[in-house]
Amino acid sequence: RLFYHLRPTETYGGVQRPPFLPDWIPWVGVALSMAGGDSFFCNVQKKYGPCVRLTAMGDTRIFITSPALITYIYKNPKAFVFEYKRRSIQSLVFGMTHTVAFSQAMSDRLFPDHHRALQLVNIGELIQKYTTQLEELVLSKVDEADGAEVDLFEMVYEIIYTASAKAFFTPSFPARTTFKPFIAFDRAFPILNLARLPITMRSQAISAREKILTMLEEWWETTTELDRAAMAPAVCVQWEIAKDEGWSKRDWATVLLAETWALEANAPFAGLWTVIEVLRRPQVLASLRAEVSSTISKLDPPEISTLMHLSQPELITLLPLLNLALQETLRVHSSSFSIRVAEYDTTFPAAVCEGRELSVKKGEEIICVTRPGNIDTTGAWGTDAEIWDTERWIGDDADDEKGKARGPMFPFGGGSSMCEGRHFASAEILSFLAIFIATIDVQVVRDTIKADFTRIGLGVMQPKGELRVKMRRRQGESKVAA
Ligand code: HEM
């Protein structure tokens, strides 16, 4: 630190550069501190401001933590671009051939067509397919458990994984056999993403990826033309491009893997965290149950199935409390790094940088660290920002006497690269929560669940620990059981 303070202030084009944070471990830099918990970025922000340069795992990049600066980045998509990173992740992490990942077809067709296919107007049927799968799975799993002790974490993850994968990729998708290999690939994701790690240190992670790619490739070979036509619109549009461009079977499998990861890496954990938080608060559970029951009673027929098959906007309107519980989960349990690359030399204006301009060089990577703003107890969300509390959303605005402090949050990123799957994800999680709350009685036996900070920056955080429960179908819910 002393060394840092003795260095003259660095400038570029006459403008001050973002301060460079010192570190002591060559190459690894601050990576270990970063993965140690929330205090790292909170302390950095307090000491050096909302924009710093850090070295972690061989890369020096700009990290920004203030909502004002993050919003500025999202509002300037021509200056700060995600596309290059999206292509390189497709190649580095999912294993696509470099020439295909950087081909014209990706930018001209795949990215825009995929974006369109996931818009709200195009996912109605997909949501129906998902909820049909989900309903069957939830009820059969709970009947199977029949009061015996189970690991709720594993059960919920497997249910959402299976229902969403079968909705996207048709019931032919081998959810049962790919489940564990997919988890192994997901665990390998952070290592695969380290471009500068020597290949020998990435070999285990690459094997995990190759295993799931082979399974996806072999499954695709068994699908019929009818199956292929019944895939989610987002899959169909990409398959058309793969055929037109003559991509290899392996490259096509990497597209399927990227789709599976987008689908399964965040949403199931958002559902799971909401269940965990609700089970820890019996009063919240009672209010949510009352909301779901009262909504079901007004439907025709008055059954959980009718509720689950509503559209995403209808679910949000009819289940406002449940939606607030989900929003609170996204606030407290997400940790996203939204990555952009500077297209040209530019300057962050003083107005969004605590009164001083900071220069950015062409090609530099900028990481929008979205979490500190959500949980900073001295920030916009108030002194209890670290606590999951649906009450903070009640009331018209932050000044309302019932309402608590509220600030901005970016669980789905922002600007032109905002998450394309957010509408599907919201319907997916809400209908899962509705059926879980309406149909199941849960008795928690052991809850040692905590957040795993080692996966910082990858979206909804993953839980570690155990959630052992006993569960049964709720008594007296004949309409539901029907
Ligand atoms: C709770 C669930 C989810 C969360 C929290 C989440 C979060 C995010 C975040 C933070 C980004 C980066 C945005 C940015 O940098 O501005 C992103 C991008 C993306 N997400 Fe999601 N996501 C979720 C579910 C999904 C689902 C279900 C899909 C699709 C099946 C999906 C598809 C995508 C795609 C394609 C992108 C890249 C967008 C682009 O480059 O333009 N996501 N997501």
Image (cartoon, grey):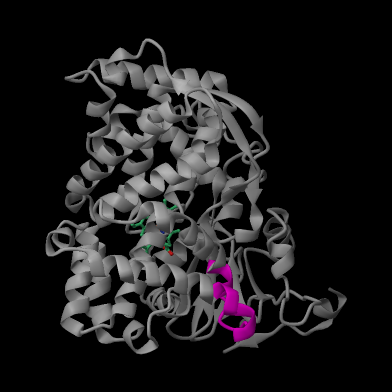
Whole-percent x, y for residue 237 in the image: 19, 67
Viewer-closest of 86 and 258 = 258
Most distant residue in the right direction: 2
Instruction: Tell me where residue 82 sits by quadrant.
Output: bottom left
Residue located 32% across and 71% down the image: 217
Whole-percent x, y for residue 359 in the image: 56, 80
200 in the magenta segment? yes
Whole-percent x, y for residue 98 in the image: 39, 87
**Residue 76 shows up from this direction:** no
Question: Looking at the magenta stretch, what is its main secondary structure?
Answer: helix
Which region of the structure is painted magenta? 189-205
**Residue 141 shows up from this direction:** yes
Whole-percent x, y for residue 127 in the image: 24, 44
Residue located 46% across and 27% down the image: 394
Q: In the image, 36: left or right of 304?
A: right
Instruction: Tell me where residue 18 sits by quadrant.
Output: bottom right
Residue located 17% across and 46% down the image: 125
Viewer-closest of 287 and 96 = 96
Residue located 49% across and 46% down the image: 269
In the displayed structure, 30 sits above or below 407; it is below
- The mark tally for this picture is 0
